[in-house]
Amino acid sequence: MNLFGKVLIANRGEIAVRIIRACRELGIKTVAVHSTADSNALHVRLADESVCIGPPQSTQSYLNIPAIISAVEITDSEAIHPGYGFLAENPQFAEACRTSGIAFIGPTAESIRMAGDKSKAREVMKKAGVPVVPGSDGPVSDEASVVEVVEKIGYPVIIKASAGGGGKGMRVVEKKSELMQAYHMAQREALAAFGNGDVYVEKFITSMRHIEVQVMADNKGKCIYLGERDCSVQRRHQKLVEEAPSPVVNDALRKKLGTLAVKAARAFRYTNVGTVEFIYDDDQNVYFMEMNTRVQVEHPVTEYVTGIDIIKEQILLAAGNPLRIKQTDVKITGHSIECRINAEDPVKFVPSPGLITSIILPGGPGVRVDTAAYCGWNVPPHYDSMIAKLIVHGRDRDEAIMRMRRALEEFIVEGIRTTIPFHKRVMESDLFRSGQFNTKFIERLNESA
Ligand code: MV4
């Protein structure tokens, strides 16, 4: 088995701690990089070495490619793990690693580029026989082609930025009178946000669930899926609660989703670990939404129900090892739920950084907390507000819900506000317990408040 001697983690927070843990269990030395705001961060304390790469602003630290590549050189690291966010889906960064002879623990720059252009990705999916939502063939470059597509698919439609993703640069259009203004606004926003004004059009699926499939591929052509995750509890495209398996997916649908996800990965010539996102509508249609070319925040729910350490497999695959898991080895056992704990007001969801004066983590059977928080840590205001992930596993969904409620009761954080009270409400709601909800769950939960 090929192994790296030393891996540099180009990230921070809970995912940096998670990657260090996987490396340590593989006997791999670790290098943490940090901004001056993270000098006392847990990932810096846990790593074997650390390098300060700049001031608090992400653009001058965690997004600073020359500084990160230099940190690799001075620590003699062989590989970089990008985690998620920051540079994880930046094809130029993957390319910079390749040309510098540094292993990038993720897919190739080419796969990142193909999946990252959302309108091109639709064309790749169509050719591969993966269903996409009815819409335009590639980007729509003028008003006439927008009108032509919309007349074919009917309202409501959604206009999306080709270089967007994750909900960024999307505009839903309900009627003809709004179409032209929305089209030009979407182009302007896309150009401003991504430097690429291309937009494409799809039929807007008004009632749907967000179901995603974890895939894993080596560079010898083997590719498997690890079941699905249901991420329908979202607020403004921020996932808040994820679970595996999905309460609405049976064995037949699981196999269908998995087969489509592997087909999609192969079409993107995908290697390493990735996630294929699907729209699942009220008529049980499945449509390709996006492919995420990174490890996801919510990977622990899949780890719990399959018993597979996804980060370890990712590192081994990047070192050129063949996939050591066969599709027939993958079994889904029990049920797992994850709650993202953010340093935010639990009602207004506005950031609440500051000093953690007390923290008590839950534990006991089937409870896992992935966090970089500790008593006396100052939650910096510069970065994403997620400070912990609370993940539980039970024999079935009801036990997982009861366990999550128990764990949330034990979870104490003082000095800052967190979304723990919000998650308690979700776990106590009949709507969540029924499992019969779509991506409008939060709106309906607030209506019932
Ligand atoms: C959609 C959709 C409905 N119809 N596309 C794309 C990015 C992803 N994170 C969310 N996306 C969606 N794409 C079509 N054709 C619904 C979503 C979607 C969503 C859209 C608006 C507001 C909240 C949403 C939550 C989940 C999914």
Image (tube, rainbow, N blue to C red):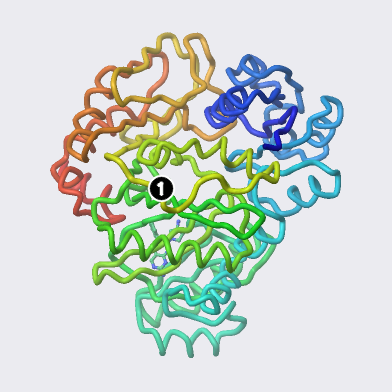
Quarter, ligand 1: bottom left
Question: Is 232 rendered above or below residue 134?
Answer: above
Point out residue 169 in the picture as x, y percentages from the top left corner.
Answer: 53, 61
Tell which of 350 and 390 is nearer to you.
Answer: 390
Q: Residue at x 43, y 55 (%)?
A: 213
Would residue 100 be found to the left or right of residue 23 on screen?
Answer: right
Point out residue 309 in the picture as x, y percentages from the top left corner.
Answer: 49, 35
Point out residue 319 in the picture as x, y percentages from the top left corner.
Answer: 70, 41
Number of marks in the image? 1
Question: Is 252 rendered above or below residue 120?
Answer: above
Q: Quadrant of the N terminus?
A: top right
Point out residue 399 in the picture as x, y percentages from the top left corner.
Answer: 19, 33
Q: Quadrant of residue 87?
A: top right
Tell which of 190 and 89 is nearer to you.
Answer: 89
Q: Quadrant of the C terminus?
A: top left
Q: Residue at x 78, y 34 (%)?
A: 78
Q: Label 1's element? A: loop
Q: Quadrant of residue 298?
A: top left
* Residue occupied by mark 1: 330
Would residue 412 be found to the left or right of residue 49 on screen?
Answer: left
Q: Residue at x 54, y 54 (%)?
A: 292
Q: Residue at x 24, y 20 (%)?
A: 409
The amino acid on which the numbered mark 1 sits, given as a three-letter code, is Val
Q: Residues within 10 Å of mark 1 (few under 14, many from 20)?
A: some
